[in-house]
Image (cartoon, coloured by chain):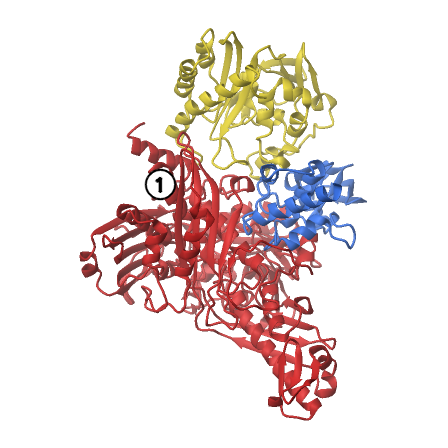
Chain colours: A blue, B yellow, C red
Amino acid sequence: MPSKTRVVTTINGEETEFLCEPRQSLLECLRDVLGLTGTKEGCNDGNCGACTVMLDGRIVTSCLVLGVEAQGSQITTVEGIAAGQELDPLQQAFLEGAALQCGICTPGFLVAAKALLGREPNPSEERIRFWLANNLCRCTGYDKIIRSIQKVAADRQGANT
Amino acid sequence: MAGGTDALVHLRAGRSDTNVIVDIKKIPELMETKFDPLTGLTLGAAVPCHQIYENTAVQSAFPGLIDSTSLIGGIQIQGRASVGGNLCNAAPSADAIPILIAYEVTCLIAGPEGRRKVAVEDFCTRPGKNILEEDEILVSLHFPPPEKNSGANYLRFIPRNEMDIAVVGVGVKVVIKNDTFKSARVALASVAPTPLFVREAGAILTGQPVSDASINKAAQIAKAAAKPITDMRGTTEYRKHLCEVLTRRSLQTAIARARGDQS
Amino acid sequence: MSTQSYEPNMVLSKKQYKVLGTRPVRHDGADKVTGRAIYGADIQLTGLLHGAILRSPHAHARIKSVDTSKAESLPGVKAVTTSEDFPEVGNKIAPSGAGGAGPAPLKKVQSNILAMDKVLYKGHAIAAVAATNIHVAQEAIGLIDVEYEVLPPVLTAPDAMGKDAPILHDDLKTIELGEQTNTVSNISSHYQFKLGDVDKGFKKADIVIEREFDTSTVHQGYIEPHAGTALWNNDGRIQIWCSTQGSFTVRSVTALVLDLPESSIKVTPLEIGGGFGGKIPVYLDPVAALLSKKSGKPVKIVMGRQDVLEGSGPTPGSHIKVKIGATKDGNLVAAQASLAFEAGAYPGAMVIPAGMCVFAAYDIKDVIVDGYDVVVNKPSTAAYRAPGAPNAAFATETVIDEIAQELQIDPIDFRRKNAATEGTRRADGPKHQRIGCTELLEAMEGHPHYQSPLEGPNRGRGVAIGYWFNVGLQSSCTISVNPDGTVALVEGSTDIGGTRTSISMQAAEVLGLQVQDVQPTVVDTDSVGYTDLTGGSRVTYSTGMAAIQAAEDVKQQMIGRVAKLWETEPDQVEFSDGTFRAKSDPGKQLSFKEVAAKAASTGGPIVGRAAVNPSSAGGSFAGNIVDVEVDPETGKTTVLRFTAFQDAGKAIHPSYVEGQMQGGSVQGIGWALNEEYYMTPDGVMANSSLLDYRTPTSLDLPMIDTVIVEVANPGHPFGVRGVGEANIIPPTPALANAIHNALGIRLRKLPMNPVKVMEAIWAKDGSN
């Protein structure tokens, strides 16, 4: 049996340690080792974005990161987006805007969208679409996802003026 | 392994029988980006794409490199994937290699015998194979300093708008003086077993006036040099056709950039 | 829960409702945006083992031997299974086959789950392993030795129908026009629909256009791979947790395949990450059950993406001929279609629905449709959103476009002239009930998109419409009244797109409650009456109907309680706006809450129940207007503007109706422009990953504007028509027509990818 490595990392603001084999992806570690099943597997080769997490301030497909590579990193998953009981404006906008149907791609989209609005508070539609091109959705046709993100950006602009 | 976005996929598909992976991202020299307008750009092999296209010095000095690094995969992939990795992966369709060839990049390789340099157009030897010996690693890529009145561009064709492997890709660099080509370099992706440096396409432009006629001639030479196959991404005939179209369009963009029309 | 303000985009039905037509936040919303919702692969159980499946590398081969001994002795492996572990089932017939369409020999259903003497497609499951982790399981399947006798594959319907085609099943004998023949072939069946006399009809035509089309195999493309977990308990009871479109289907197929009583199996449907028809067939659960039996532990099996593409059920590729005749003033007089569908490895292509729909949007008196269900060495096909109809519409709607163009009649006008109405007969016999085809076309014609000019070179506009009959099928529902006047609603329709909320809204409307006072749960097969699968655009319609009737039952029971309290007869009590009133004295009132609080003292718990099986459903029409720009140097099509129209009957929750329309439209766009199974001559799918199986990304699309046309379905108390499916039908022909409008080229093979468009341009120019 391959020996396991101890990884110490910060996940959703909390120091977390786990054991994993080198061949286990970060996605596998999150889901099967840590029980954080909010991040989903859709393809395991970086093409669908369902496994998107924030890793040291960048969004990545966690299926293509090894668990051991996360040593010392800061990770945010969908489980860390809400502020306790209160949903993040993006989560609320997705619900009110019906931006999810089956919901399997939603965690990936929320992490990606939050990363975008964190860097570019007022992105154009084209920019949003480009940013999200690595996140596949098969149910919604993306329309309501884009509109929900636009709404959050617009609300923030409104709040700031 | 740098970003792992190709390496892990190959491993899982059983295309590689590696037992040990060495994470090289903690080696400072491989993670550095150093630019000096007089000596050029030294790009560590493991620097991820996003760090490259967010680097303001690289944006103004090597816009063709920005083209490539913004196109590989999507935002998430660009958070990990590196130009060095794209080069070492040595796919004929690699999105970073044509522009490296156009920019006359030199590869710095380190091994137990010491260090050596290789012209980037010689780095890939066969589909998926590169010139590194088993005990060597790619350390960094060196870009000569940009010349005045030069412009470069990477342009590829894909069936969707992002995420696809290039059906055909073209990297070009031109240097223009008094509306004449002082020099030009053209390289193609996805039309040969390795990325293809089409010397003749660049040579035909040298000394020629910048015009549709000269551009078209270079595009025809690129088309003739291409030896594409038919596969799930395109037919031979279609790829050859695209070589001509994309070379022409890419040259036009590079020329505009050389003239300072757009960045 | 709040509602979002919206711009009206609907042709509204006249009736106003309190709850229906609003846009509440869905009940399962918080779980789904926080990552708490448990989908098929998320379930965790003590002692869980992970399963992996060995799949055939060959498209067609005899299995000479299977040696699992090395896999069994790998440390960490706890069980191995093959089809040897299936019980012998003789000649039993399963109600639905390997792909879910129509009755089939049970042995064939078993053999698609785990192959027996032959493998019939690359990816065909042969053996499975359960181990302590997924990596060990994957290593183990690499240690299973299979000896194959490789046979030549056949990959298209026309080839498989040919005289010298390799035969997949030497016990498959063609059913010819309803009669069993003795001919062994790859043609499982040939049916024919006939109206009038098509030869006479064509004689009346001034213009006859006959064209041939090919559509490629495409996959439903759900983002969540199949996942099933089973525990075969020490008491002989099997528990299954899975993502499925039909938990009762999983139960019955597992029972049949393992030759067990249905009562020994309990299926708990977990949240599901997309299905579109592809998660109706059963693949993993019986295998997980066998592994659990042999290991004594629960076993979870999750398909990888390549397995999904190669080992589940895509939709048939097809070869279609359509011939339509019209008079010069634009009346359609005759129509003929020949539909040859690839069923994949086992019979059951959805070629009959294709025949039902191919001309169903039009009033044509003389029609003949021939359909062929043909096996080929590809995965056994499954339903994909209005299965069969998109293939047929690609043909019909482009021929209609050609005729309209020849006759110089506006394409929407031409369709409206010939539109099916109530009483028009479909090719398969039934007459349309009240439908909204004409209203749909009127909405399209009057829309600003159609009225606005399209300017610029290489740009074109295309329109198309499509029809799907929708189904009813069985649903059960229970509503329990809580002492505080809220209610718990229990139903068994797995929720793929927000239906638990649309069902709750209907119950809330009947009971005069706010939607957040109705708490829905989708439950397991032990906890609710039989409920057919989620599909066929039936859930909001049929399970909604069950919820309405259960709510009516609650209402009647509460009327009885009020009568008791007022010491009068039930017929003296009426209910409206959430209040019970005495007919004789309108001032005498009790609210729903007040009556609920008195349940215990007036007779006990109030539990309403209903079970329905509507024999038909309201058909739905969908239409598209699409603008494209085609790059004439690369053949790439960019969708500039897209408007989707659909007659949904009463839209219960407009946001989710719009969402269905947008999702189906985008699947249609992918089908039209890029998606296909690129097969090598050996029968291997070369593009079996999401890198090269190209579904649309957000960057490939504009916003998808929607118009809901509400022509109430008289068969449903609120006028609901199923909306889930019809929207995938018009995009492929609408885009073909738009490309023609842009560049003057007609494409008759899907997908219309850049290579094909370029080849058509070259053919037209006579160049290259």
Where in the figure is residue A111, as x and y percent of width and height? 68, 44
Mark 1 residue crowding within 10 angstroms, few (<14) / some (14–19) / many (20+): many
> Quick one: quadrant of the N terminus of chain C?
bottom right
Callout 1: chain: C
Q: Is residue C78 visible?
A: no
Which structural element holds mark 1? helix
Residue lying at the far right of the rendered structure: A15
Where in the figure is residue B56, as x and y percent of width and height? 68, 22
Q: Residue at x 48, y 19 (%)?
A: B251
Which quarter of the figure has residue C520? Answer: bottom right
Left or right relative to A152: residue C256: left
User: In this orientation, which residue lies closer to the viewer: B44 or C641?
Assistant: C641
Q: Is residue A52 visible?
A: yes
Where in the figure is residue C650, as x and y percent of width and height? 51, 65
User: In this orientation, which residue lies closer to the viewer: C186 or B236?
Assistant: B236
Left or right relative to C679: residue A60: right
> In the image, is residue C342 above or below residue C694?
below
> In the image, is residue A54 above or below residue C31?
above
> Quick one: quadrant of the C terminus of chain C?
top left
Query: How many numbered callouts?
Result: 1
Residue type highlighted by circle 1: His
User: In this orientation, which residue lies closer to the viewer: A140 or C753?
Assistant: A140
> In this figure, which residue is indicated by the disc labeled 1?
C740
Where in the figure is residue C696, as x and y percent of width and height? 51, 43
> In the image, is residue C199 above or below residue C592?
above
